[in-house]
Image (tube, rainbow, N blue to C red):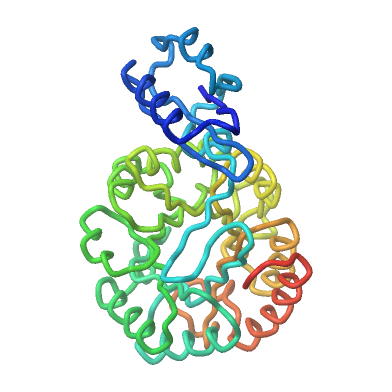
């Protein structure tokens, strides 16, 4: 349930209204936007005294919310969420470029890639230390050593780091990781999501390969319900009948999620198709469709990569893509 407050209501009047609502054993999500102020009611609203609420002189109208996700819902938070990560903005008005190797393989590899992508204009360094692989015989990542190498690359370049967390036991090691990634396979690991919701860390939540948009937003809700509103939604391709590409990139997710939610939306064109030669066109399409950023896999020698070399582009190819992205940013009056 949403209460829309009249624009001339004072802070003291809003505070009294919230106190009255909370006295009815309901939680409140208060959002003061640029155009309107709303109070979201969370809990069993069947017990709420609607007549008492509606007759309050500062209440403009009361709306019922049909969707089961509340805190991720744009009705609860009309303005777009902008997440600050060490001075870099993720969200409306900014295009975030997250780039780096699928997997950290050595200090020389990750530092050299980090320096290259920074020179081209990347804003974040991604790198897998723990790798969920379909085959148990495939390279599983360097583990905790890989995280330390990412930190070295951060010291060398100043780029905030993004890496995937696979289980709760790894959480203490991610205390110094700037953005924690939840992979597609863990999108509905609700125990993990709840614990991440108790942290203050920005969480990059990837859509499950067979997940609907509603299920995607409900997973974000698990994190936000625990108090962490710093969630970035990432579309990385879904499983369909098509076999020409690794997955099918669902670009329609951008306008739909933007309408339903206030959270930033980024696209992972590398995982979406699994083909390096499609990354540039899919990046262009994502930015043109209104994405808040992209996550691109970059490797200095894709043919020798220990993980997902077929979908990785070279630093030279990344630099070319960034030239295009910068032009798009200028056209759309966005900050890179």
Counting from the top left corner in percent of width and height, residue 33 is at: 56, 43
Q: Quadrant of the C terminus?
A: bottom right
| Lateral position of residue 114 relative to residue 238, left or right | left
Compared to residue 107, the image places residue 292 above or below, namely above
x%, y% of residue 64? 56, 19
Q: Position of residue 92 (x, y in %)?
A: 61, 57
Q: Is residue 135 visible?
A: no
Q: Nearer the viewer, residue 139 or 168?
A: 168
Instruction: Compare residues 240 and 30 and report the one nearer the observer.
Output: 30
251 or 94, which lies in front?
Answer: 94
Residue at 61% x, 55% y is 247
Residue placed furthest toward the right: 331
Give residue 23's quadrant in the image: top left
**Residue lying at 58% horizontally and 86% vertically, measured from the top left:** 315
Q: Residue at 28% across / 79% down in the picture?
A: 148
Task: Judge whether 294 appears above or below 192 on screen.
Answer: below
* Above or below 75: residue 205: below
Vertically, is 85 above or below 190?
Answer: below
List x then y, in percent, for residue 72: 50, 39
Number of callouts in the render?
Answer: 0
Residue 281 shown left or right of residue 25 in the figure: right
Q: Is residue 318 visible?
A: yes
């Amino acid at each position: 349930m949403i209460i829309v407050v009249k624009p001339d209501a004072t802070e003291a009047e809003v505070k009294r209204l919230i106190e009255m609502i909370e006295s009815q054993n309901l939680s409140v999500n208060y959002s003061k936007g640029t155009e309107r102020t709303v109070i979201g009611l969370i809990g069993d609203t069947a017990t709420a005294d609607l007549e008492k609420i509606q007759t309050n002189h500062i209440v403009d109208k009361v709306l019922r919310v049909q969707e089961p996700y509340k805190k991720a819902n744009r009705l609860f938070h009309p303005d777009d969420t902008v997440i600050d990560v060490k001075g870099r903005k993720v969200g409306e008005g900014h295009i975030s470029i997250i780039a780096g190797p699928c997997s950290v393989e050595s200090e020389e590899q990750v530092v050299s890639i980090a320096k290259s992508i920074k020179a081209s204009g990347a804003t974040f360094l991604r790198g897998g230390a723990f790798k969920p692989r379909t085959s148990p015989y495939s390279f599983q990542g360097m583990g905790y050593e890989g995280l330390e190498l990412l930190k070295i690359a951060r010291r060398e370049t100043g780029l905030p780091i993004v890496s995937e967390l696979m289980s709760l036991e790894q959480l203490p090691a991610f205390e110094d990781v700037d953005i924690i990634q939840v992979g597609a396979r863990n999108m509905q690991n609700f125990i993990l999501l709840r614990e991440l919701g108790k942290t203050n860390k920005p969480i990059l939540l990837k859509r499950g390969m067979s997940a609907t948009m509603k299920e995607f937003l409900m997973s974000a809700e698990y994190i936000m319900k625990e108090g962490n509103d710093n969630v970035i939604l990432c579309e990385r391709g879904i499983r369909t009948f098509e076999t020409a590409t690794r997955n099918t990139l669902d670009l329609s997710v951008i306008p739909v999620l933007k309408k339903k939610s206030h959270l930033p939306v980024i696209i992972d064109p590398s995982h979406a198709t699994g083909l390096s030669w499609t990354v540039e066109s899919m990046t262009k399409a994502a930015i043109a469709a209104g994405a808040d950023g992209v996550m691109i896999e970059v490797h200095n020698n894709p043919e020798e990569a220990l993980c997902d070399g077929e979908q990785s582009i070279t630093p030279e190819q990344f630099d070319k893509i960034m030239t295009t992205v910068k032009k798009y940013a200028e056209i759309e009056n966005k900050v890179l």
